[in-house]
Amino acid sequence: MRKNRFLIMFVLLAAVLMMRPVTAAGDILYTNSQTGYQVIIDDGLDLLNDAEEKRLLMEMMPITDYGNVAFVSVNAEVPTGAFSRERYNLLFGDSSGTMFVVDLGNRNIWIYSHGDVYKTITKGYANTITDNVYRYGAKGEYYDCAANVFRQEYTLLKGGKIARPMKHITNAIFAFIAALLGNFLVLKNSRKKEKAEPEEIFAAGTLSRIKATGEAVMISQKRSRRVESGSYSSGSSGRSYSGGSGSSGGSHSSGGGSHSSGGGGGHRI
Amino acid sequence: MFSCPSCGGKMYFDIQSQKLKCSHCGSQTAVEDYRLNNDAEQHAEDDMTIYTCRNCGAQLVSPDQSAVAFCSYCGSEQILEEKLNEYQRPAKIIPFRVTKNQCRQQYESILKKSFYAPKEFRDPQFMERFRGIYIPYWHYEGGFAEGPVEAKGYATYNRGDYTYNEKYDLKADLKGSWHSMCYDGSSSFDDTIAETIAPYKAGSFKEFNTGYLAGFYADTADVPPEKYENDVLRHAAEMGEESIKRAYRNRNITPSLPDNEKKLQKLLKPEIRRTGPYLVPVWFLTWRKNDRVAYAVVNGESGKITSDLPVDARRFFAVTLLCAAILFCPLTLFVSMTAPTALFLSAFIAWIVSWVYRREIMHLHDHENHIFDRGYFIDERPGEISGEKAEKIRKRRHNLSAIGAAVAGMFILLILMMVFMDYGDYAPAEKAQLGCTFLILPAFWNLLRALTFVRHMKDRTYVAEALSCFAGIAVALGVLYSDPVYDWWYYLGCLVCLGGVMITCFGLIRRYNLLSTRAVPELFARRGGIDNAEE
């Protein structure tokens, strides 16, 4: 009887696991049948109750038209940016998408995007969105915080605009200060006066008829064999130049790739 | 006065024809051909009257009373009085070649490019006030004392697989002379102006003839010729050094001559053999407002112009607002930053402005204390910087300017990379905190330097201007280290910081107008350089 009970429990558990696909680090709650993109909620800190999770899922689903989407809550022991990148790789690999992370360990919220989605939800927009929603996070209203993030992301992905009030205020001040300083420096530079040295006030300077004649008596001579390191150093210099140039190109291209493929931004909460 | 041999009318030196021309009948006579009998010639020399400006003490000489209507140095009118004094005849002169009309055209072309120049500078009546004036220069001639110059030398060369190092005992003979080494002889004429309108052609000097002064006036040399002796000897020693190096160059021998200028002079023994005043032509336009004057000065031989042009603050701020509006568009389209980054950027701008302000205040200090006008220090003036100290400051500025710019450039690059580059997974607030920490020390250095320059100034607004940027950076650092959650703290910090920047920026514009004008020269006891030379 007891054996049967264990067997039934095992079968049920297996059935549940089979019905609800699980990634290495979160539940796949929805898969867009047309695009194949998925929604994952990995609320490790239980910040959302079941009802909130369901409502959040509804907010996240439209984003799957453009890419994968995830919500993660965690007490990260590494910087939130590093954690986000790693967790995204774990969840979606190289597939396009966006992920919102609430990291209570570092008291940060973070948006990480990748692939085509990153072309829209850039680092700048990630910072703007987190700027717009961090107040909810600071008050512990994590559902409102996350829901607003996904709402604003969806607005951007479908080509809309989001409010950036402080950006305009700071940009206006910066524009004024930069114009003031730039205008001043241009003025200073345009009125810069070329000056001659006191001795050059008369062209051709001082007219001189000075002539020196000299004798030279050698008092010592030392002869030493030239060290090979001279030519070696020259060869080495050539090698180093060519190697450096190649390596630099490679690194640049790799950096470029990394930049365009993913990144994000966040805010303290 | 020069009378016309045909009609007895007044003659003046006509620049276009380079001859004396009668203002009445128009007849022309070459200056060298204008003959007076002995009595008349003596009379013409006696007619050279020295006028002393009651306001600034400038001494001007002219055979023509009408030429001296006002003092070009301080702009005072009707204050010139005749003073009977013996005038030392200059040895040579470069006559005027640029006419007043050409001078005005040059000035107008400068004004066209200077949108911020005040309206009154464009007034045609004001431009009529250009006056031709001859500036005295002390002319030095000399050579090197007899006797061989003994020094060590060395040569290094490669032959085959070997490097040869040879040492030599050198014995050189330095023969010949130098001339046309000239230095400003008038304390009223700022050396920095002379250096800006330079050069004059040393070959254009002609034998002095009083006729060249007809219609113009000349400043007198009040700086004693001994004032520049050290400069003359230093320059002569440098020429001697170059000659000796040249003599051994074809043998690949490098003479080891002393770097120290005193030791070099002792070794090469340059000596001054003759000194005398030479005159060079300058067109002078003086604008005066309250206790400041601005000059436009044109080289009377080449037409090269320099002008002090203050800024019309209204025009300046109108253009600034327009630029700000234009700049706002790309900023809005392409720039987005977090609140901590915005705060860092505010602090960074504050640091840049504090650096610019420190440099401006340093220039203002040098400008107001005539640091680069060596002729000004003919006498020690109580309460003012001494000539010796000015010399030390000049050398310090010369040595430090390039190094300072390089260090500042590297620093700016480092800080910007630190904050704006993607080099790790740091939050914007962490990067901003780090960047701002690096800013605070150089900002404090800027503050200290600025305060050393302004400490003697009565106007306390200088201190407020120097402090406000530093205070802004300190506030920014405080906010970043307190690490608040709410953005409005950062934005408040931004506003405080940028407020400080604005105070300093407004100060910069105000001080710019001091830098682009000069204090009205004050009356002081001018030693008669010419009189000295005669003693």
Image (cartoon, helix red, strand yellow):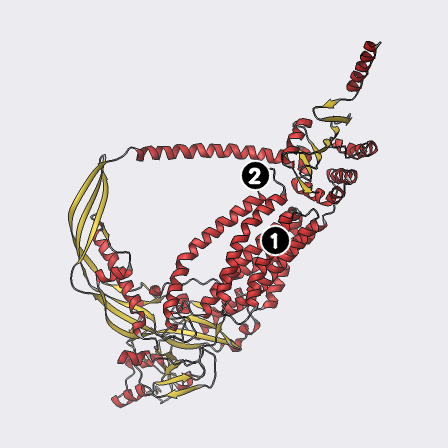
Quarter of image, res A158: top right
Mark 2 neighbour density, 10 Å: few (under 14) some (14–19) many (20 or more): few
Of the pair A178 and B226, the residue shown nearer to us: B226
Q: Residue at x 48, y 74 (%)?
A: B519
Q: Residue at x 40, y 60 (%)?
A: B396
**Res B384 → quadrant:** bottom left
* Quarter of the figure that contains the N terminus of chain B: bottom left
Tell me the kind of residue under disc 2: Tyr
Position of residue B170 in the picture relative to residue B384 (left or right)? left
Q: Which chain letter goes with mark 1?
A: B
Q: Nearer the viewer, residue B181 or B341?
A: B341
Q: Secondary structure at mark 2?
A: loop
In the rendered structure, the answer to whether residue A203 lies left or right of residue A83 reads left
The C terminus of chain B - image quarter: bottom left
Residue B433 in view here: yes
Q: Residue at x 62, y 35 (%)?
A: A260
- Which comes before the other along the chain, label 1 or label 2? 1
**What is the CA distance from the residue labelled 1 to the residue labelled 2?**
22 Å
Q: Count of labels shown? A: 2
Q: Which residue is mark 1?
A: B346
Residue B425 vs residue A12, the one in the foreground:
A12
Residue at 30%, 83% (x, y): give it. B34
- The label shown at residue A110 is none
The x and y percentages for residue A84 are: 66, 33
Q: Quadrant of residue B397?
A: bottom left
Looking at the image, residue B372 lies above or below residue A252: below
Q: Which mark is residue B423?
A: 2
Q: Amino acid at mark 1?
A: Ser
Q: Are marks 1 and 2 on the same chain?
A: yes
Position in image of residue B525 (x %, y %): 39, 81
